[in-house]
Image (spheres, rainbow, N blue to C red):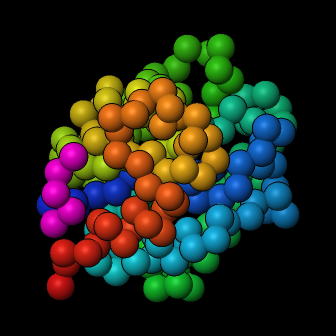
């Protein structure tokens, strides 16, 4: 992991990191509930000059459980809440494919993270990808990022599998660490 002062880009998983996760998928704005402090954490990172992006598997689209319009509404809510808190999400990459489709964007494949690198014109090497699942850790490693685990969502189980990966209680704790040495 690069030192916090060298963090220029933070990539975040969505479900279980920014918002509460559900085994039944988050299918509407009404089902989307931010984890306490996560919106403010994103704003804090952004206000510190760090580019913040999101990479999220959304197999509910491929399974016919959620429409692209509903996903767009959820992401607009997220973006607006972060804006209202004084922050900015630069890009949201999502994989709409069914897990059996064999695409290169669905985590643990690195496609969405590589897209974020292209969209932002930033080098991903060593930059943190904050997630809560095994797929997030594997995608970060495949893209040359530094995996970070938060203990929300599936983080407790993932930390047990990857005890050497840096872990934080939640996104707020990660953001506090990431901006601690900044002016």
Residue visible at 56% across and 85% down in the picture:
84
Q: In this orientation, which residue lies closer to the viewer: 146 or 78?
A: 146
Tell me if residue 106 comes above or below residue 159 in the rendering: above
Determine the image quadrant of residue 38: bottom right
Q: Is residue 160 visible?
A: yes
Question: Taking 44 as reference, is 134 left or right?
Answer: right
Residue at image position (58%, 59%) is: 18
Q: Position of residue 110 (x, y in %)?
A: 39, 29
Could you say which is closer to the camera, residue 33 or residue 150? 150
State left or right for residue 166 relative to residue 18: left
Q: Can the viewer see residue 12? A: no
Q: Which residues are magenta?
A: 1-5
- Quarter of the image that includes the C terminus: bottom left
Question: At which x and y percent is residue 71?
Answer: 71, 52
Query: How many callouts does the rendering have?
Result: 0
Nearer the observer, 96 or 7: 7
């Amino acid at each position: 992991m690069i030192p916090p002062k060298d963090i220029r880009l933070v990539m975040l998983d969505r479900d279980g990191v920014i918002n509460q996760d559900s085994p039944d998928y988050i299918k509407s704005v009404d089902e989307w509930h931010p984890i306490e402090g996560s919106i403010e954490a994103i704003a804090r990172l952004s206000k510190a000059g760090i580019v913040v992006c999101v990479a999220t598997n959304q197999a509910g689209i491929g399974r016919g459980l959620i429409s692209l319009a509903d996903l767009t509404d959820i992401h607009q809510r997220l973006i607006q809440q972060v804006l209202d808190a004084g922050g900015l999400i630069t890009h949201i990459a999502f994989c709409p494919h069914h897990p059996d489709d064999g695409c290169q964007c669905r985590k643990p494949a690195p496609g969405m993270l590589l897209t974020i690198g292209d969209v932002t014109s930033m080098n991903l090497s060593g930059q943190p990808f904050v997630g809560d699942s095994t797929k997030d850790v594997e995608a970060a490693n495949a893209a040359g990022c530094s995996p970070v685990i938060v203990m929300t969502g599936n983080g407790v189980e993932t930390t047990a599998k990857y005890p050497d990966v840096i872990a934080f209680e939640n996104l707020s704790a990660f953001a506090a660490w990431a901006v601690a040495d900044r002016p």
